[in-house]
Image (cartoon, rainbow, N blue to C red):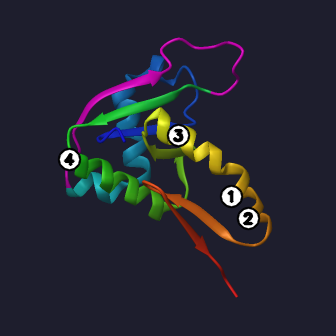
């Protein structure tokens, strides 16, 4: 796991041309987590779009990686995002996730077929880091 990184998925391309990515991220935080921003100033060390070059064949916007100076800041933001249920940027839904290594991402992809079958049977599975499967059964 890349310890202090957060991945933001869903912010449209070109928004960083209007304002610096760091300011864009702070705007997202203020819009969705005003209490979190008031109680302690979070320190963003670095921000960037990945991959660096945009693929014109890929219609989805590139993701933004935020590197926080403190691990606790990352955890507080991700916890607030989970509690918020829907995080938005200018009214459009976006996702905040922990930035994980390619190996972890590949391992999670291998579970997708199994998880899909479980969902069709009314279960609520989820993968927990590092390698636990949690299933919620109602009724």
Asked if residue 47 is among those painted magenta in the image, a careful observer would answer yes
119 over 102 or under it: above or below: below
Q: Residues within 10 Å of mark 2 (few under 14, many from 20)?
A: few
Indicate which disc residue 41 carries.
4
Prevailing SS of the magenta stretch: loop
Element under disc 3: helix
Residue at the extreme right of the image, as rendered: 120
Placement of the C terminus among the 4 image quadrants: bottom right
Residue at 46 percent across and 46 percent down: it is 97
Determine contact: label 1, label 2, CB under 8 Å: yes
Mark 4 and mark 3: Cα distance apart in space: 30 Å
Q: Quadrant of residue 12?
A: top right
Residue that badge 1 annotates: 115
Mark 4 and mark 1: Cα distance apart in space: 38 Å
Residue that badge 2 annotates: 119
Q: Is residue 117 visible?
A: yes
Q: Residues within 10 Å of mark 4 (few under 14, many from 20)?
A: few
Q: Is residue 92 visible?
A: no
Q: Residues within 10 Å of mark 1 (few under 14, many from 20)?
A: many
Placement of the N terminus among the 4 image quadrants: top left
Given residues 12 and 46, the one toward you in this image is 46
Residue that badge 3 annotates: 105
Given residues 90 and 75, the one toward you in this image is 75
Mark 3 and mark 2: Cα distance apart in space: 20 Å
């Amino acid at each position: 796991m890349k310890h202090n990184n957060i991945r933001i998925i869903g912010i449209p391309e070109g928004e960083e041309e209007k304002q610096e990515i760091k300011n864009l991220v702070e705007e997202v935080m203020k819009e969705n987590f005003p209490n979190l921003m008031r109680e302690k100033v979070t320190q963003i060390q670095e921000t960037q779009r990945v991959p660096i070059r945009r693929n014109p064949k890929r219609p989805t916007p590139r993701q933004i990686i935020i590197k926080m100076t403190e691990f606790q800041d990352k955890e507080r933001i991700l916890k607030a995002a989970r509690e918020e249920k829907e995080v938005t940027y200018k009214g459009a839904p976006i996702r905040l996730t922990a930035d994980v290594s390619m190996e972890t991402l590949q391992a999670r992809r291998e579970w997708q077929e199994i998880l899909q079958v479980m969902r069709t049977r009314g279960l609520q599975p989820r993968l927990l880091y590092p390698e636990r499967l949690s299933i919620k059964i109602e009724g």
